[in-house]
Image (cartoon, coloured by chain):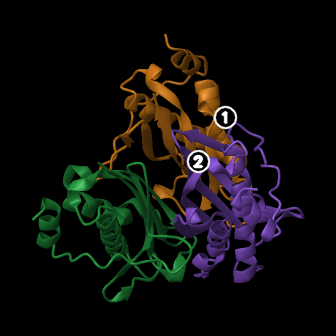
Chain colours: A orange, B green, C purple
């Protein structure tokens, strides 16, 4: 069992089927050794995680939503690796968009929900450059959307 | 005639002169085989397409604005290819920003205006990773701004 | 003295210690010859530059905040170069997020504060692709956040 699958199991995470967008865009594109993954919206097995941080969600709920985006990113990443984690080099970059009130200023604490999971699952290979900002609103009213770049070997 | 030019002609699209920003940034930068194209704001031959989706514009009008951003991206891309579409490998990534109300949740339908045009013109090479979010506001009051990465051969 | 250090000295700019984020993300990741730098928030020796452009800050104050983000980006870039500017190839891309009112439409003039500094310090190698949008809000209430990609030789 690959250490990444062990880490996922230890965290009680089962990666979902990598969701496929229903439009003329695709979940990820690999060019050279870089994989660009489409923005993943906050959802889990129970459905979409909607709401606005600072209004209907607090920071901890926002961070949990961000963690769910990270789970979806990992599902897409595993698919991009053809199911073989040994092909992964490292995380490169996350951009996190938080659905928040104009007064909200804890975007980094929200997106840490994703950053922390990356390192918990991928170890040092999970450390990444990052931006965390608020969006005026997000698709379907979700709380968080995160896109990513990873490097394969 | 290259199939991409045929597709553009069949769609009745004449690519505009690739607009050159009037500042210390440039329309695109190629590094290795990747071309990073600056955010293109919604405009056509009649001028800027301004407005806020969910307020002064509906989804269809937003999608048309996004389509116009895609036309500008294609104009910059053709310039990046030195006018020779045979140098294009594929679309890699779009990030679309929608000028919308805080209640608006159909960002994907708006940005589909750009994604659909990419595939209509470039075929399978036009499929791309994508993020679609709302911005609190956009330059000059435009409805949509889209940036892109393409790969050349 | 490298011309870039001369340009910085002539502008009276001392690069700060490249700030290290206190989380599971890192200031920059190099993959191949590309350096992805995390979003840098507006701050200078006096502290964070907070506020909302169009409300508590005017365009010139926003541009100064953007310039400070660019100074932080250059500090991270120098660190990514191991202190040796000769390793820099060029700037590739900036994405600038402005904390503004929904009515604000001069995002490009704000982000020019960063773009102009890049070219003042790096010369032609500082010209970059760019997007400039407004965020609904930014971490810690800062006025501007800018992320960047640079190419090394």
Nearest the eye: B121 or C148: C148
Q: Position of residue C116 (x, y in %)?
A: 64, 73
Q: Position of residue C48 (x, y in %)?
A: 83, 62
Q: Are marks 2 and 1 on the same chain?
A: no
Nearest the eye: A105 or B89: B89
- Decide: is C36 above or below C41: above
Q: Determine which residue is flagged by label 2.
A: C36
User: Could you tell me how far apart the alpha carbons at marks 2 and 1 are, in whole angstroms?
Assistant: 19 Å
Q: Toward which corner of the image does residue C25 lie, by quadrant?
A: top right
What is the secondary structure assignment of the residue under circle 1?
helix
Nearest the eye: A134 or B13: B13
Q: Chain of mark 2?
A: C
- Decide: is B77 above or below C79: below
Q: Give the crowd class for mark 2: few <14, some 14-19, many >=20 residues within 10 Å.
A: many
Q: In the drawing, does residue A134 fall left or right of residue B35? A: right
At x 50%, y 42%, the residue is A149
Q: Position of residue A9 (x, y in %)?
A: 55, 17
Tell us which disc is closer to us: 2 or 1: 2
At x 70%, y 56%, the residue is C74
Disc marking residue A116: 1
Nearest the eye: B113 or C116: C116
């Amino acid at each position: 069992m690959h250490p990444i699958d062990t880490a996922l199991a230890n965290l009680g995470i089962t990666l979902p089927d990598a969701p496929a967008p229903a439009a003329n865009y695709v979940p990820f594109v690999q060019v050279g050794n870089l994989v660009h993954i489409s923005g993943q919206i906050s959802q889990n097995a129970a459905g979409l995680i909607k709401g606005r941080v600072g209004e209907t969600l607090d920071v901890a709920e926002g961070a949990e939503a961000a963690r769910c985006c990270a789970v979806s990113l990992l599902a897409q990443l595993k698919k991009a690796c053809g199911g073989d984690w040994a092909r992964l080099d490292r995380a490169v970059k996350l951009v996190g968009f938080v659905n928040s009130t104009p007064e909200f200023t804890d975007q980094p604490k929200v997106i840490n929900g994703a950053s922390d999971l990356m390192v918990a699952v991928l170890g040092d290979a999970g450390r990444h450059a990052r931006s965390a900002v608020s969006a005026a609103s997000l698709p379907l009213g979700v709380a968080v959307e995160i896109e990513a770049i990873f490097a394969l070997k």
